């Protein structure tokens, strides 16, 4: 085989083989049509086709992002707002996505715009600005329900831009500034009120503590005086008791001595009688008559 023949064969192979072999990349599927009629779905890899009678349509089954163009929507309170967003979708039935609708991506965009108008048109401006999560959830539910028949799964819906007119924004900015100043004044007044309450409470507690201290001091003084009085009374009672005992002992001794003197007197009735007296008796007699 000469070089010219080899080159011709290589050219034929380079031209003819691609006509029979097609590639399906990862993340795609191939829809095979025989004489322009769908026959089967091919997974990623090399696919053999008969040129002229078989064709293949590649469908991307990865999650894709669709941009929803900006549009003006009138809210329930007749305020125009500029809105746009993004929709995350994934084709889970390539056959339906290809043959049930002519352009599934354009259909999703149109449906998203229509649902945005429906949802935001039933809400006031303040609700639209403060309930983005609620709007996203309602759009997701509605779009996912409507696109299911096209073999499309709506994964997420996000509102990117939601802006009222410039004059409304200026009014809202002034309102927010006034509200912040109002809250600041309220907080300042509340702080002053709390400080006065705290100060008065502290003064009250101080007076209570001082009165309690004075009361305790008076109680302690009274208890001290009472204890002193009791001690003096007990001492006086003890002294009186001792004096009484001493007096009893004294008078008892005097009575004994008196009886002894009577005996002596009776015994000395006659002067001729002689008696010898005990020294203790003489001592008692001497004390009775005061003789030392």
Image (cartoon, rainbow, N blue to C red):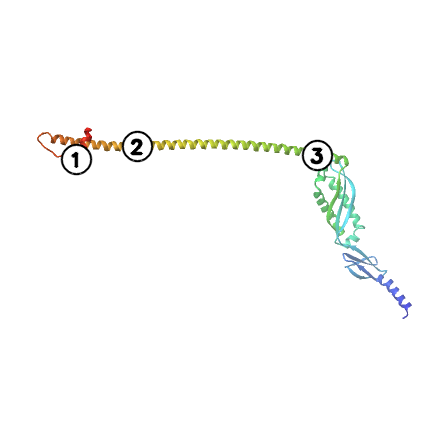
In the picture of the structure, the residue carrying the numbered disc 2 is: 239
From the image, state whether disc 3 or disc 1 is nearer to you. 1
* Residue 124 is at least partly visible in this image: no
Image quadrant in which the N terminus is located: bottom right
Image quadrant in which the C terminus is located: top left
Label at residue 279: 1
In the picture of the structure, the residue carrying the numbered disc 3 is: 177
Residue 247 vs residue 171: left or right?
left
**What residue is rendered at 54% in x and 33% in y?**
202
Q: Are marks 3 and 2 in contact (CB under 8 Å)?
A: no
Compared with 151, 175 (above or below) is above
Residue 133 in the image, given as x and y percentages of width and height: 70, 43
Residue 6 in the image, given as x and y percentages of width and height: 89, 68
Local SS, label 3 = helix
Q: CA distance from mark 3 to mark 1?
A: 124 Å
Label at residue 195: none
Identity of the residue furthest to the front in this view: 292
Label count reads 3
Local SS, label 2 = helix
In terms of image quadrants, where is residue 176? top right
Q: Earlier in the sequence, mark 2 or mark 1?
A: 2
Residue 2 in the image, given as x and y percentages of width and height: 90, 70
Local SS, label 1 = helix
Compared with 59, 253 (above or below) is above
Q: Are marks 3 and 1 in contact (CB under 8 Å)?
A: no
Crowding at mark 2 (Cα within 10 Å: few <14, some 14-19, many 20+): few
Crowding at mark 3 (Cα within 10 Å: few <14, some 14-19, many 20+): few
In terms of image quadrants, where is residue 114? top right
């Amino acid at each position: 085989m000469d070089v010219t023949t080899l080159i011709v064969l290589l050219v034929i192979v380079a031209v003819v083989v691609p006509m029979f072999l097609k590639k399906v990349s990862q993340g795609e599927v191939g829809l095979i049509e025989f004489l322009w009629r769908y026959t089967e779905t091919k997974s990623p890899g090399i696919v053999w086709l008969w040129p002229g009678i078989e064709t293949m349509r590649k469908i991307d089954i990865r999650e894709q992002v669709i941009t929803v163009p900006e549009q003006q929507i009138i809210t329930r309170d007749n305020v125009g707002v500029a809105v746009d967003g993004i929709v995350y979708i994934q084709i889970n039935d390539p056959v339906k996505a290809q043959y049930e609708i002519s352009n599934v991506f354009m259909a999703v965009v149109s449906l998203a715009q229509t649902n945005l108008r429906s949802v935001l048109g039933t809400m006031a401006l303040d609700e639209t600005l403060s309930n983005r999560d609620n709007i996203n959830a309602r759009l997701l539910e509605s779009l996912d329900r409507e696109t299911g028949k096209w073999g499309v799964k709506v994964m997420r819906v996000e509102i990117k831009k939601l802006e009222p007119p410039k004059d409304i924004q200026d009014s809202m900015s002034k309102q927010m500034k006034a509200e912040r100043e109002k809250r600041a004044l309220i907080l300042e007044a509340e702080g002053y009120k709390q400080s006065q309450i705290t100060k008065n409470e502290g003064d009250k507690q101080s007076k209570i503590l001082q009165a309690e201290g004075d009361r305790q001091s008076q109680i302690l003084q009274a208890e001290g005086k009472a204890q002193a009085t009791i001690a003096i009374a007990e001492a006086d009672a003890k002294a009186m008791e001792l004096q009484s005992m001493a007096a009893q002992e004294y008078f008892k001794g005097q009575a004994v001595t008196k009886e002894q003197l009577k005996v002596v007197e009776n015994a000395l009735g006659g002067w001729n009688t002689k008696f010898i007296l005990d020294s203790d008796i003489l001592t008692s007699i001497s004390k009775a008559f005061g003789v030392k």
